Image (cartoon, rainbow, N blue to C red):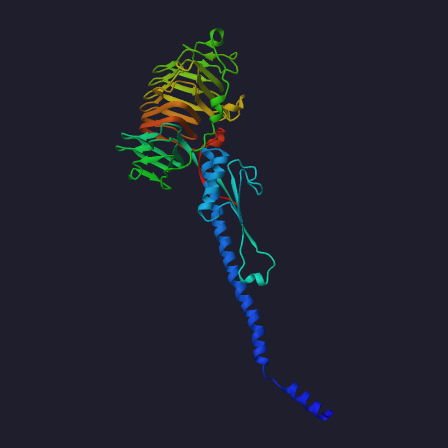
Amino acid sequence: MTVATIHDRLVRLRRDRRGVTSAAFAGAGVVLFGAVAMATDVGVWYAARRDAQSAADAAAIAGALTLPRATATQARNSALDLAARNGFAHAGATTVAVNIPPMAGPRRTDPNAVEVVVRQQQTMGAAGMFLSSPPTVQARAVGTLRDDRPVCLLALTDGISLGGSAAISAPDCAVASNRRSGDGFSISGSASLAAYTVSAVTTCDGCDRAALRVTEPYKEWQFAATNPYAALDTKLLPRFNGSSCLNPSGQATLEPYETNGGRAYCQDIRLNAGETLTLRPGTYYLSNASLRINGGATLRCSGCTGGQGVTIVLTGNPNTVGEIDVNSAATVELNAPANPADPDWRGILFYRDVRASTGGTAVRLNGGAGLRLAGGMYFPSSVVQFTGSSGMTGCTVLVAAALDFRGNASAAVSSCALTGTQTPVTRRVAVVE
């Protein structure tokens, strides 16, 4: 073969295009297959990430729902159970971490917060041709109880009832019941209620009636509202007898514990028609004694301005702790102290010892009473009964074992900052991180 022949064949080979399309298609096919494989696997992983986030959210809510009524272990188990029900059981390639409080984030010091972190290693299909190790999807959620609405009327154990022609007005606050069995709230007869909302741990009887006028729909099976006065239940109250007692009978002005030598009033404070009793700012202990204001009598505070006010504490032996009885046409004008000598009484107007007997009605506000009460009224073991017209203005926060309305009353939380009164709040679960 001559050199010329060899040269001609090389020229023809260089110019030959047969098979180029096949080679190009083969190369493009490999790229296309890889792209489709990756897209398919990435879609699966994206769906797994979305499902993991849904499971984490549900588990965090379940834990937060359980935590207020149970131990941290029970809350953790509730979260793990919800994650498993949503396809992410803590086993094998899936890990579910439940942290109370959260390990990171702004809620890491919140004792009511539950953090759930879901991790799951994914399987690889054709993407294994391009990746050296399978990816892991991760989702995180933090559920907690969030304060919702201020509460001005709160029943702790025995519910709230409105009957007869009761007409209650609390337009800027919630009415709440923490009762855990039976109806937490009931409204019957021609009674009516105007409130921001009604919140009950159990059920609400009659709340579908037109007589219930609320800004937000009433809520059943809710969390218990907070009780900002619960610390008073364990407060060590002074005990009085003999020389540590005073008799209020016949006096037109009473001095408080802080200026009367650290003594209590151990006989009833009773005012009859035409009588007026003036209190000085401070704390008044009534030891085994009641406060009884009859029709036509007046009880007021002199000097209760600029944050000054009074706190009336009913204490003594459990079976003989006194009562509060305000009758028709009586006038009571009192407000709580914003900065008392004992900070535990800040914003508290009335307190009846939690150790008092729970039998019967211990606080009665009866027909036509002209009440001008501002502050927190805390009766943790007492039934409070309203009959007739009892108009309360300004800051009215009433927390009792039970509330029974058979007359008209008003309540508001609009000016509680003036008395330093803390307000209960309703709570709801939210995913916050």
Q: Is residue 143 left or right of residue 167?
A: right
Q: Residue at x 33, y 39 (%)?
A: 213
Most distant residue in the right direction: 3
Residue in front for this viewpoint, 426 or 301: 426
Q: Is residue 314 visible?
A: yes
Task: Point out residue 78 in the picture as x, y percentages from the top left corner.
Answer: 46, 39
Residue in front for this viewpoint, 20 or 350: 20
User: How many dots with numbers?
Assistant: 0
Q: Is residue 101 left or right of residue 200?
A: right
Q: Is residue 326 left or right of residue 11?
A: left
Task: Point out residue 197 in the picture as x, y percentages from the top left corner.
Answer: 38, 38
Residue in front for this viewpoint, 219 or 82: 82
Q: Residue at x 57, y 69 (%)?
A: 31
The quarter of the rendered structure image containing the N terminus is bottom right
Relative vertical location of residue 49 with respect to residue 288 in this rendering, above or below: below
Most distant residue in the front direction: 1
Q: Residue at x 73, y 91 (%)?
A: 3
Most distant residue in the left direction: 189
Q: Is residue 139 visible?
A: no
Task: Point out residue 184 in the picture as x, y percentages from the top left corner.
Answer: 35, 32
Q: Residue at x 34, y 18 (%)?
A: 296
Task: Point out residue 419 in the picture as x, y percentages from the top left corner.
Answer: 48, 28
Relative vertical location of residue 203 with respect to residue 40 in this rendering, above or below: above
Residue in front for this viewpoint, 416 or 150: 150
Relative vertical location of residue 139 with respect to residue 338 in this rendering, above or below: below
Asked where in the image residue 329 lies, by quadrant, the reply is: top left
